[in-house]
C-alpha cells in the first residue's frame, strides 16, 4: 500500500529534446506535457503485473514491472542513480533538480524538485540502500492521465516506484528492475498499467544511453 505518498512519473522524450526551451517552460510553469522516447533492445516485461481489485467503490492496486540488462558494471550504474538529485544526468528532458531543506541526495525523506518538460515536480525518497542497491520514491501529487482526444479520461492515480540493481557476473553487467505500484479507480487500472508498461522501458533506455556515453566499453 501507499501511505498517502505518491510518485509523479515521467517518460523519457526523444534524445536531444532537453533544450533551452524547456528551461523557459519551467519558468512559466506550463501545463503537464507527456512524451515517450524511443526504445532499444532491452529485455521485455517479465511475468504478469500484479492486479488486485477491491470491492465496489474502493481503489484497485496494480503494478507495472520491467527488467533490462545494462552493459555496465553495477557499481558504475549505482553511482549514477543513487543520488536522488541526479535525474538531469540520466533522464532526457529533466533540465534542473534541487533537494529541498539542505538534505542529502541519499537521505530518506529528502524531497527533490525537478523540472521535466516545463513542469516542476516534487518527489520524496522513501527508501534507500547502498547495500541492496535499491531506492524507492513517491510523488507528492496524484498523477493525472495524459490528455488525449475524447471526453473521457481515467481519474488521477497515486503510485510509488522502485529501482533495484543486481549484478550479472558474466560480462560484468547489471540487471535493473524497475516497478511502479499504482492505486487507481478499478475501471482505470488496465489503462494506467499499460501506460507505465510503456514508460518504464523508455526511462531505462535514457539511463542506458547515458551509461554508454559516460562508461563506454573498450
Image (cartoon, rainbow, N blue to C red):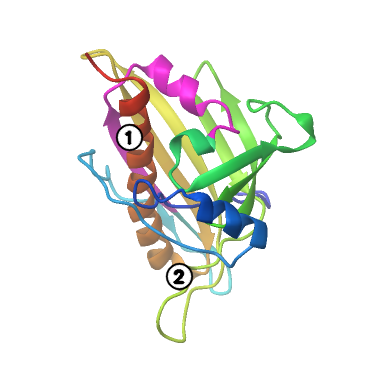
Which one is nearer the viewer's eye here, 172 or 21? 21
What residue do we see at 61% from left, 51% from top? 6
Q: Is residue 176 left or right of residue 44?
A: right
- Picture coordinates of residue 108, whole percent (x, y): 68, 30
Graded by Cα atoms within 10 Å as few (under 14), some (14 to 19) or many (20 or more), the crowding at tag 2 reads some
What span is colored magenta in the figure?
A: 63-86
Q: Is residue 122 above or below residue 53?
A: above
What residue do we see at 37% from left, 23% from top? 214
Q: To which residue does mark 1 refer?
A: 209
Q: Element under label 1?
A: helix
- In the rendered image, the quadrant that contains the C terminus is top left
Q: Find out whether residue 73 is within the magenta segment.
A: yes
Q: To which residue does mark 2 refer?
A: 188
What residue do we see at 36% from left, 31% from top? 176
- Picture coordinates of residue 16, whole percent (x, y): 37, 46
Q: Determine the image quadrant of residue 56.
A: bottom right
Q: Is residue 28 above or below residue 199?
A: below
Q: Find out whether residue 189 is within the magenta segment.
A: no
Amino acid at each position: 500500500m501507499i501511505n498517502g505518498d505518491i510518485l509523479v512519473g515521467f517518460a523519457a522524450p526523444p534524445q536531444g529534446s532537453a533544450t533551452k526551451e524547456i528551461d523557459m517552460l519551467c519558468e512559466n510553469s506550463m501545463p503537464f506535457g507527456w512524451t515517450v522516447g524511443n526504445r532499444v533492445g532491452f529485455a521485455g516485461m517479465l511475468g504478469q503485473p500484479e492486479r488486485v481489485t477491491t470491492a465496489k467503490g474502493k481503489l484497485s492496486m496494480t503494478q507495472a514491472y520491467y527488467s533490462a540488462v545494462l552493459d555496465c558494471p553495477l557499481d558504475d550504474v549505482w553511482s549514477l542513480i543513487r543520488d536522488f538529485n541526479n535525474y538531469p544526468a540520466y533522464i532526457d528532458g529533466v533540465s534542473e533538480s534541487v533537494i529541498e531543506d539542505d538534505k542529502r541526495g541519499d537521505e530518506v525523506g529528502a524531497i527533490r524538485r525537478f523540472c521535466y518538460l516545463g513542469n516542476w515536480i516534487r518527489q520524496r525518497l522513501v527508501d534507500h540502500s547502498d547495500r541492496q542497491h535499491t531506492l524507492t520514491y513517491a510523488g507528492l501529487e496524484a498523477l493525472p492521465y495524459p490528455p488525449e482526444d475524447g471526453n473521457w479520461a481515467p481519474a488521477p492515480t497515486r503510485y510509488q516506484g522502485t529501482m533495484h540493481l543486481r549484478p550479472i557476473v558474466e560480462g560484468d553487467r547489471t540487471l535493473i528492475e524497475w516497478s511502479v505500484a499504482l492505486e487507481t479507480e478499478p475501471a482505470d487500472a488496465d489503462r494506467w498499467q499499460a501506460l507505465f508498461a510503456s514508460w518504464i522501458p523508455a526511462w531505462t533506455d535514457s539511463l542506458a544511453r547515458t551509461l554508454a556515453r559516460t562508461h563506454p566499453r573498450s
